[in-house]
Image (cartoon, grey):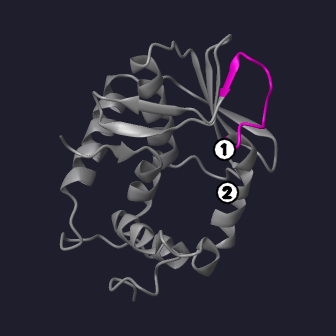
Amino acid sequence: MEDNIKISTLNDFIFCPRSIYFHNLYSSYDEHLYQSSYQTRGKNAHKNIDSKRYCSKKEILEGIDVFSEEFGLIGKIDLFNIKNKTLVERKNKIKTIYEGYYLQVYAQFYCLLEMGYQVKIIKLYSISDNKNYYIDLPGDSEKNRLFEVINEMKKFSLEDPFRQNQNKCNMCIYRNLCDYDE
């Protein structure tokens, strides 16, 4: 049986496939030693969700584990309102909606469907400025792209040719370790 892919790594893989390797390499170390302030703020934004202290309403599922056998995915969702069938992914500050954000909520969407929930609305919520960004439900092209990225992740090797994006590399917390850094 193949290993399942964590939903959170979809966004990381789109940012830089090599970052997942370094993230796993450092996972046993104290995060304060290597995480940037952006990551620390993002992690803090999820504390109430992760501890299930964000909302006491019974129709709100928070921080629940989700999975998809079809996609080979596992992860957590931030919030799902059973009553109005709304999936919410919270981010500390959204300036741009990146492809990785889309893939992350699409993965959560498909996990929830496979687990028997109906999802009618998907939104990203920017915590620091209290903004909602509504995302269209995925269609065939989005589903195919999700499968494509998952397959790329399964096949990825550090030895593979790598197309560097200097803007991303400049923001990467692992740039000092990466042999592609200029």
- Residue depicted at 52% across the width and 78% down the height: 170
In reply to whether residue 11 is colored magenta, the answer given is no
Q: In the image shown, does 144 or 70 lie closer to the viewer?
A: 70
Q: In this view, does 42 lie to the left or right of 111?
A: right
- Which structural element holds mark 1? helix
Most frequent secondary structure within the magenta stretch: loop
Image location of residue 171, percent across then percent down: 55, 74
Residue type at mark 2: give it. Answer: Gly
Position of 171 relative to 99 (above/below): below
Position of 124 relative to 136 (above/below): below
- Which structural element holds mark 2? helix
Q: What stretch is highlighted in magenta?
A: 50-61
Q: In which quarter of the image is the N terminus?
A: top left
Q: Nearer the viewer, mark 2 or mark 1?
A: 1
Image location of residue 139, percent across then percent down: 38, 22
Position of 44 relative to 103 (above/below): below
Check disc 1: other Cα within 10 Å, few if <14, some if 14-19, many if 20+: some
Image location of residue 51, percent across then percent down: 70, 43
In reply to whether residue 55 is colored magenta, the answer given is yes
Q: In which quarter of the image is the C terminus?
A: bottom left
Residue type at mark 1: give it. Answer: Asp
> In terms of image quadrants, where is residue 37?
bottom right
According to the picture, the residue beneath numbered tag 1 turns out to be: 50
Could you tell me how far apart the alpha carbons at marks 2 and 1 are, in whole angstroms?
A: 12 Å
